[in-house]
Image: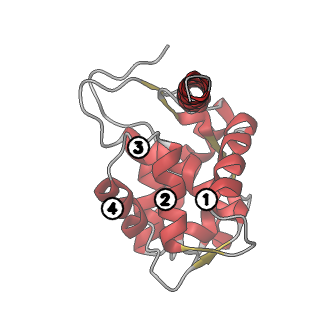
Amino acid sequence: MEYINPLIQQTQQTTELINRFNEETRLEEKKLEKSKAPRTFNALSIQCTLPSKYDELENLSSLSFLVKYTKPLANRQQIIMKLIRKIQPDTAIDIDDAKDIVFEYFNQYKTHEDINELFHFLNINSLNKFQSKEIIIICCYAERYFLHKLNKNENILFQRPLQEIIDFEFLKRKLDGLKLTDDLKDLIKTLEAPNIKYLNMD
């Protein structure tokens, strides 16, 4: 018995060390994942290229416009694809999983209420099913969306490509003659620079 007790104690200590190591590893992995996610809201997370014929924009929903005429940043795509595989590896993604992915994309910094407002703004309802490409677009667009809803403690970058700025200036001159949906008109406003005094243009 005297021989067995030290063995039991040693086994318990070893188990505790393994558990502690696993917990520390998990925390380090979590820190690493957070370091890869966006630390600032960056307008370059998504870039827009408008069609030469503006009437092609008529009757488009907000999400259809984003999927068709925007391109996400490559490193953002990698981050989001990792989250998609973690949360919902299936081909079709329902709205609850989609919201969870966006929530994790912002490292749980944005609240569920913030995410719900984003989906409401994009007129996305509970019947929607998403492909990976759409989720990537929504996450990257969300950075521009939240640029317009900042508090003074948040860091942002807003530098759009010159061609995008020119495209949107020409589009604004033609808006009155186009039959755009109200949702799309509101979306276009969020793709432009926010009117914020403490905007960081570095």
Instruction: Point out which mark residue 100 bears.
Output: 2
- Tell me which numbered mark, 2 or 4, is placed earlier along the sequence: 2
Q: Residues within 10 Å of mark 3 (few under 14, many from 20)?
A: few
The quadrant in which the N terminus is found is: top right
Could you tell me which residue is drawn at 62 percent across and 60 percent down?
A: 135
Q: CA distance from mark 2 to mark 3?
A: 9 Å
Q: Amino acid at mark 3?
A: Gln
Q: Residues within 10 Å of mark 2 (few under 14, many from 20)?
A: some
Secondary structure at numbered mark 1: helix
- Tell me which numbered mark, 4 or 1, is placed earlier along the sequence: 1
Q: Which residue is mark 1?
A: 87
Q: Position of residue 100 (x, y in %)?
A: 49, 59
Q: Amino acid at mark 4?
A: Glu
Q: Residues within 10 Å of mark 4 (few under 14, many from 20)?
A: few
Q: Considering only vertical position in the picture, is 183 above or below 83?
A: below
Circle count: 4
Secondary structure at numbered mark 4: helix
Q: Considering only vertical position in the picture, is 111 above or below 18?
A: below
Q: Which residue is mark 4?
A: 117
Q: Which residue is mark 3?
A: 108
